[in-house]
Every structure is written in C-alpha cells, then in structure tokens.
Amino acid sequence: METLTVVVKGIPELDAALMEKLPNQVRSIIRSVLVEAGEWMAGQLSGAAPRSPSDKPHPSGYLAGSMRERMSIDIDADSAGVYVGPNADAFYDYFVEMGHRIVKGGYSKLTRAGARGPGHEIGKAEPHQYMATVFDTTHSQWQEIVERGLRERLGLNV
C-alpha cells in the first residue's frame, strides 16, 4: 500500500500559533484538517480507481466506491497522519495496484518452498498503479489543503 507523507516546515507563525493553543485544541484542529484532507484524497482515488467488466466478482465501480478515509489518525509531538485507501472489503486493491499471476485450478503454481501446487498459471495481470499516480500528481494540492486548513482554523492570514 502506498504511503503519503507531507512535511510542512519553515512556517514560524504556524508553530507559534500551535504552541499558543491548548494540547486538546491543537489535536482537535489537526484531526479536523486531516479529516478534510483525507476526504478530498478519497475522492481523488475514487475517481481514478479502475472499473472492471461486469462478469467479475465485484460489480464495476466497487473499488472506487470503497475509498474512504480511515480515522486511524496518529498524532504525536512530531507528526500526524491519516490513512486513505479502500476499506477492508476491497482487500484485492493490492493485487490491482501491484499486479499478480492468474492461476487456474488451484491456489498457486509454486508454494513458498518452491514445490509445485495443483494450480496452473495462465497469465499475469499487469499492475494498475492508480493510487501511486494519484499520490504523485496531487501531492502539492493535498499539502495546500492541509496548510490552508491549519491556517484558517488557527486564525492566521490565509
């Protein structure tokens, strides 16, 4: 799974404003900004998610519809982050993003020990790295959303 890291540095007035607020207020501000930025990123990912033919196990658009921001927000003294990606029902997103072998008649052509299993490899599914592409192309926009949200909520000049 892709990880997006944004570091905002060199903004002394932002640091000063954060220090003026009580710790709980700061956490609340950071959480609300990350939720807003996470929802925006989930929309970007949803728009870029590939659609499948209707004969697949999940209907076309299922992966796109599964995008949501997860509130696994981790805030400590040095960093804060939010996970954005498909929900657990769309576990196969990893295979879409990274590609995989297509095996018929069993679980795998090879086992971890290298012994042959009952499966027969009939092809390969090429990677569709839509998440990595979205993260790469929208990184600066996402960073602006976070920075603008922090400035607005802290009452700094926008």
Image: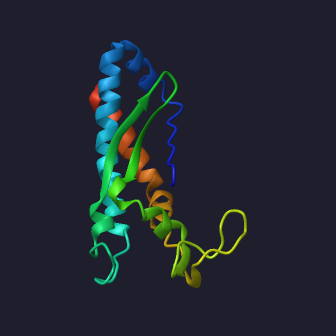
The structure residue drawn at horizontal position 51% and vertical position 54%, both measured from the top left corner, is: 2
Q: Report the residue that reaches farthest toward the bottom.
A: 122
Q: Position of residue 44 (x, y in %)?
A: 34, 60
Image location (x, y in percent) of residue 6: 50, 42
Q: Quadrant of residue 17?
A: top left
Farthest residue in the right direction? 114
Q: Decide if residue 130 is in sight here.
A: yes
Q: Position of residue 32 (x, y in %)?
A: 28, 34
Q: Would residue 148 be found to the left or right of residue 105 on screen?
A: left
Place of residue 148 in the rendered image (x, y in percent of width and height, measured from the top left):
34, 39
Q: Is residue 148 visible?
A: no
Q: Nearer the viewer, residue 40 or 67?
A: 67
Report the quarter where the C terminus lies: top left
Is 77 positioned to the left or the right of 58 in the image? right
Q: Is residue 84 above or below residue 124?
A: above
Q: Quadrant of residue 124?
A: bottom right
